[in-house]
Image: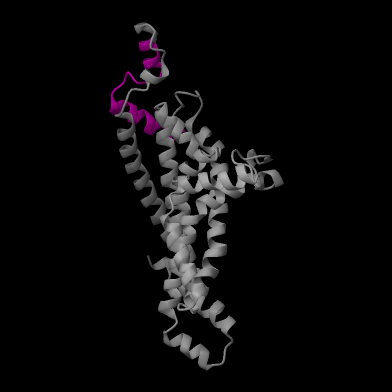
């Protein structure tokens, strides 16, 4: 285990270093934030002073090495717009994005696996065919359109749920969470459902395929021959066998949902990282863009590491110490 973790940490460091170079070069080589940040009527002297203060008078390589030097100290630059550390701005918005992402993923797991099992055990009946048709339908729906429809139906027409914002929040260790208040939960419902539809459809299809592939296998037939109950066969044999690909997809979807929650956060005015990155791109706030992308890469690597460790618990045949 220790060797495995050491190797993964080294690999992660190399990946982060390579990604920092690619991201920095791509972001800092495009556009000129001075055109956005400074009043067009400002004098040339004021422009030059601002360029120097932001460090934009140096070459791209010099800027990167300064960024790299500060990154080893835990600093990813200062926002051009907010004049605050970029990583601080992101960490302030991260709880809101995590709250939304985890809620959406829980909805997908709680409904996706049982529906996939139902469809897989009886693939030819009307209920199963309806579940599979629904999953294909969810795959095809554009996120922005679903969000607008949810707002029109449940916020405007019937006023069941609020359409924007997080509602009331509670502070825990300096971070604010809305799922611990009733008003916050009401605000969380619509964006969570909107974000959950795609992973829900994916988990249904994956569970269905896993059930169909596993049912004809010998160990399932042997379990039936032993006289085990249908419930025990499904929960202790069938589901355990198909959980590895499902866990993989859930892990990947968690990272993907964090990275691509931008549309949902924009539609529902959810104050997460997605809205921050949209504002930063609009204003060419380069340090925030770079810091955001590196945080997303780090989350991807962390989730993949956790999934690899879970493999060894789900399947004793997998030994991560041998990797």
Q: Is residue 160 shown left or right of residue 258? A: right
Q: Residue at x 35, y 47 (%)?
A: 15
Residue 312 visible in the displayed image = no
Q: Residue at x 51, y 88 (%)?
A: 223
Check the image and name the residue furthest to the right: 182
- Secondary structure predominantly adopted by residues drawn in magenta: helix
Q: Point out residue 308 in the picture as x, y percentages from the top left corner.
A: 44, 62
Residue 260 visible in the displayed image = yes
Q: Does the segment drawn in magenta span residue 203?
A: no
In front: 82, or 71? 82
In front: 61, or 147? 147
Check the image and name the residue furthest to the front: 157
Q: Point out residue 211 in the picture as x, y percentages from the top left corner.
A: 45, 76
Q: Is residue 187 shown left or right of residue 323? A: right
Res 4 quadrant in image:
bottom left
Is residue 282 shown above or below 274?
above
Which stretch did the figure color magenta?
47-76
Q: Point out residue 198 in the picture as x, y percentages from the top left corner.
A: 46, 56
Q: Does the segment drawn in magenta span residue 66?
A: yes
Which quadrant: the C terminus? Answer: bottom left
Q: Residue at x 56, y 58 (%)?
A: 107
Q: Point out residue 216 in the picture as x, y percentages from the top left corner.
A: 42, 84
Res 53 quadrant in image:
top left
Figure colour scheme: one colour
In front: 6, or 215? 215
Q: How many marks?
A: 0
Q: Residue at x 65, y 39 (%)?
A: 167
């Amino acid at each position: 285990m220790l060797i495995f973790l050491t190797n993964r940490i080294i690999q992660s460091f190399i990946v982060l270093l390579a990604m920092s170079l690619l991201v920095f070069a791509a972001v800092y080589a495009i556009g000129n934030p001075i055109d956005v940040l400074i009043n067009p009527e400002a004098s040339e002297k004021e422009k030059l002073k601002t360029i120097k203060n932001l460090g934009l008078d140096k070459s791209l390589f010099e800027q990167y090495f300064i960024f790299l030097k500060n990154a080893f100290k835990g600093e990813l630059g200062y926002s051009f717009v907010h004049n605050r550390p970029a990583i601080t701005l992101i960490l302030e918005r991260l709880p809101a994005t995590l709250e939304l992402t985890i809620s959406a993923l829980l909805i997908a797991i709680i409904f996706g696996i049982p529906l996939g099992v139902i469809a897989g055990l009886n693939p030819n009946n009307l209920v199963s065919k309806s579940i599979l048709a629904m999953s294909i339908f969810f795959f095809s729906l554009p996120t922005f359109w679903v969000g607008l429809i949810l707002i029109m139906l449940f916020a405007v027409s019937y006023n069941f749920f609020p359409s924007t914002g997080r509602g009331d929040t509670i502070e825990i260790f300096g971070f604010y969470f809305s799922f611990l208040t009733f008003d916050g939960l009401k605000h969380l419902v619509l964006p969570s459902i909107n974000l959950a539809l795609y992973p829900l459809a994916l988990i249904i299809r994956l569970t269905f395929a896993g059930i169909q592939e596993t049912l004809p296998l010998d160990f399932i037939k042997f379990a039936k021959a032993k006289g085990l109950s249908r419930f025990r066969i499904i929960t202790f044999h069938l589901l355990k066998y198909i959980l590895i690909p499902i866990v993989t997809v859930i892990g990947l979807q968690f990272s993907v949902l964090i990275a691509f929650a931008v549309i949902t956060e924009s539609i529902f005015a959810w104050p997460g990282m997605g809205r921050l990155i949209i504002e930063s791109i609009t204003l060419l706030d380069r340090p925030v863009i770079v810091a955001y992308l590196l945080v997303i890469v780090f989350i991807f690597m962390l989730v993949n590491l956790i999934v690899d460790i879970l493999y060894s618990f789900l399947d004793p045949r997998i030994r991560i110490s041998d990797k």
